[in-house]
Amino acid sequence: MDVKTENGTATPKAPSTRPAVITRNSSMNGPLYRQAENKKNIVTRRVMKRKEDGWVKSLARWLVENQIGLSFNLLALLFLAHFLFSKAQPFTYKFFTLCYYNPNTGKYAAGLEDFYFMVFCVVLFTGLRALFMEHLLAPLARHWGITQAKTITRFSEQAWLLIYCCVVWPLGMYIYTNSPYFLNMAELWTNWPDRELTGVMKGYMLAQWSFWIQQVLVIHIEERRKDHWQMLTHHFITIILIASAYAYHQTRVGNLILVLMDVVDLFLPLGKCLKYLGYTTACDIFFGMFMVSWFIARHVLYMMTCWSVHVDAARLIPNVCYSGSMDNLTGPFSTPEEGYSHVLEPFVNPTGIVCFNDNIRNSFLASLLFLQVLTLMWFVVIVRVAMKVLKGGSPEDLRSGDEAEEDEGEEEVDSDEEVTQSPQPLEEEVGVEAIDLKRRVHAKRVSVTSTTGVSLPGHSDRRELLNRIGCEKQIE
C-alpha cells in the first residue's frame, strides 16, 4: 500500500507489524503448585540465571514434576500384584498391614519387616502431599486471591503440614490420654521392656517415622531454604530418636515427645496461611498462640521430660538386659562387658538382647538435649519476629526464602485481558512542511533509536524501553 504526500508522489508504506503477544508456554514445567495456571488474568515473568544443571538436580526436578504419577502408579502396581497373583500375597501384604501380630496378646511386636509398611507410608505421603498441594491447596490459594507463584507454593506447603498435624496430633493425644502415663512421667519407665505394642501405637510410631523420612526427601528434591542444614539436622535427630524409641521399647516417651512437638505445628502453619491470605490481625493472634505453645511445649514440658529421662529412668530401670519375645522373655541379666553389639542388636533382631544402662540412657538424653538446642536457636528467631510485630511490623517467615532467590526472580501481575505489546507506529502520514529538522536532531540525542535511525515515540528512556519489551531482567 502506498502513502501519498502533499506533492502527489507515492511512497511505499512499510508492511504493518503484527502485535507481539506474550503468552504462556502450554507445556507444564513442574507441578501446578509451583507455577501459575493457564489463566488469562495472571501474567508470570520468570527470570532465570542458572548454570547447566547436573544429573542430580535434573533427577530431583524430574521427581518433583512426577511425584503424583510415580507414587500412585507404584501403589497401583502393588495392589494389582496383590490381588492378581496369589503367590505374591505373602510378600505384598507386608506393605499395607502391620506385621508381627501375636494372637495370644492381641498386640504387635517390632521387627525388620516393619520397613515394608514404612516404605508404603513414605510413597503414600509423597503422593498425597503432591496431590493435595497441586489439585486442592494451590487452586484454593489462587481462588482466595494469591497470585505470586512462590506465595502459592508456601501456602500449599504450610496447609499440607497443617492437615497432617490435624490428623496425627489428635491421634497422639488419644494414645496419651488413654495411657497409664497420662500426666504421670514416672509411668513412662515402668514394665520395661514391653516388647509388644497395640495396633494404634505401632501404626502411629511407624507413620511418624515414615513422615520424617519423607520430609528428608522433600527438602532435597525441592528448592533449598536458607536454613536447609538446620532443618536437615533436625529431621535426622528426630528420625534417630523415633527409631531408638521404637527399637528399645520406649514408645511411651516417644509418644509424649511427639505430642509436645506436634502441637506447635497446629498454630504456626495456620498463622502463615492467614498471612499469605492477607488476614494480618488473625495472623498476629495465631502467631502469639504459636509463640506461647512453643515455649510451654518445647521448652518447659519438653525439659521436664528430659529431667524424667535423667532421674526417673535411672531410678526405675536398672542396668539390665533381656532377650526373647514377649511370650518367651528371659532376664534380667547383666550388660555384656565386651563389645557394643548389644547396642545395635535391638535394631536388627527384635527378639535378641535389649539392654538399658547409663550409657544408653545418656545417649538418649544427649540427643534430646541437642534437639533442644536447635529449638532454642529457632526460638531466638521467633522472639525477633515478635519484637518486630510489637514495633508495628508484620510477622515474617525468616526461613521461607530460597537459597537461589538472588538468581531467580518472578513477578506476577493482574490483567483483565491477554497481555499484548504492540510496537509504536514507525511512520506517520505528514506534510513536508511539518518536518522539523531541529526537533529530529534533538530527538536523536534523547531517544532510543533502532538501527535504521527511526525514533520510537514514548521510549525516551532506555531502561523503560527494555523493561516494557520484557527483557530478561527488570532494569532498576
Image (spheres, rainbow, N blue to C red):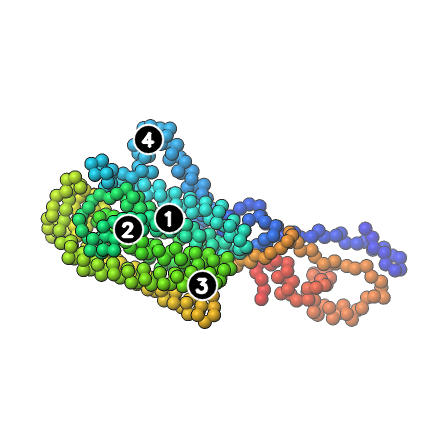
Q: Amino acid at mark 4?
A: Ala
Q: Amino acid at mark 3?
A: Asp
Q: Looking at the image, is mark 2 or mark 1 earlier in the sequence? A: 1
Q: Looking at the image, is mark 1 or mark 4 earlier in the sequence? A: 4
**Spatial separation of the CA atoms under disc 4 and disc 2:** 40 Å
Q: Which residue does the numbered mark 4 point to in the structure image?
A: 88
Report crowding for label 1: few under 14, some 14 to 19, many 20 or more residues within 10 A (C-alpha): few
**Spatial separation of the CA atoms under disc 3 and disc 4:** 54 Å
Q: Looking at the image, is mark 3 or mark 4 earlier in the sequence? A: 4
Classify residue 298 as left or right of residue 132. Answer: left
Q: Which residue does the numbered mark 3 point to in the structure image?
A: 284
Q: Residue at x 49, y 45 (%)?
A: 135
Helix, strand or loop at disc 1? helix
Of labels 2 and 3, the one closer to you: 2
Q: Looking at the image, is mark 2 or mark 3 earlier in the sequence? A: 2
Q: Amino acid at mark 1?
A: Val
Classify residue 465 as left or right of residue 111. Answer: right
Q: Position of residue 178 (x, y in %)?
A: 27, 48
Q: Which residue does the numbered mark 2 point to in the structure image?
A: 177
Classify residue 42 as left or right of residue 178. Answer: right
Helix, strand or loop at disc 2? helix
Q: Residue at x 85, y 62 (%)?
A: 431
Helix, strand or loop at disc 3? helix
Please indicate, yes or no, whether residue 220 appears anywhere in the rendered image. Answer: no
For residue 167, the mark is 1
Q: Amino acid at mark 2?
A: Thr
